[in-house]
Image: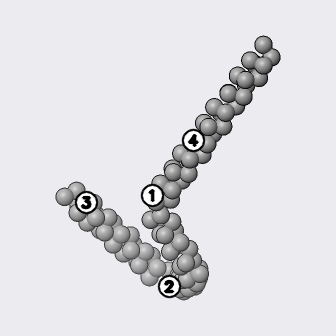
Amino acid sequence: MNKLRHQQLKSRKQQLLTEIQQQRQSLSDCRQHWFEITQYYDKGWQTLLAFKPYAVIGSGIVLLYSLRHPKKLYRWSRRMINILGFIKIVRNTLHKD
């Protein structure tokens, strides 16, 4: 009986090891697929991070300018919001067709 039990355990261990190997292979395949899907977003994020120093300098300049000319900053910010809204409308219209 002890030998039979030992044989069953050995067989079960081999089944589990095979299952683990298959799961590892599946994870490896899914990982590659995930990298292919998210590659576009990663490149975009890296591009944004490349402009971080310029954004910090630009925001400082805008802050100093807004302290001296608050009405102009308000006017330009409204114009930018209107332009972005127009671009969004055009993009949505083009994507519907």
The CA distance from mark 4 to mark 2 is 66 Å
Nearest to N terminus: mark 1 or mark 2 = 1
Tag 1's secondary structure? Answer: helix
User: Mark 2 belongs to which amino acid?
Assistant: His
Nearest to N terminus: mark 3 or mark 4 = 4
Tag 3's secondary structure? Answer: helix
Q: For the image shown, how many numbered marks are present on the structure?
A: 4
Residue ID at (66%, 37%): 17
In percent of width and height, residue 79 lies at 36, 75
Q: Which residue is mark 1?
A: 37
Tag 4's secondary structure? Answer: helix
Residue ID at (50%, 85%): 69
The CA distance from mark 3 to mark 4 is 42 Å
Q: Which mark is residue 53?
A: none
The CA distance from mark 3 to mark 1 is 21 Å
Foreground tag (4 vs 2)? 4
Q: Which residue is mark 3?
A: 95
Q: Which mark is residue 69?
A: 2
Foreground tag (2 vs 3)? 3
Residue ID at (53%, 45%): 26
* Image quadrant assignment for residue 1: top right
Circle 2: is it few (<14), some (14-19), or many (20+) Cα within 10 Å? few
* Image quadrant assignment for residue 72: bottom left
In percent of width and height, residue 49 lies at 56, 74
Foreground tag (3 vs 1)? 1
Front-most of residues 21 and 63: 21
Q: Which residue is mark 4?
A: 22
Circle 4: is it few (<14), some (14-19), or many (20+) Cα within 10 Å? few
User: Mark 1 belongs to which amino acid?
Assistant: Ile
Q: How did the renderer colour the structure?
A: one colour
On the question of residue 82 being in view, the answer is no
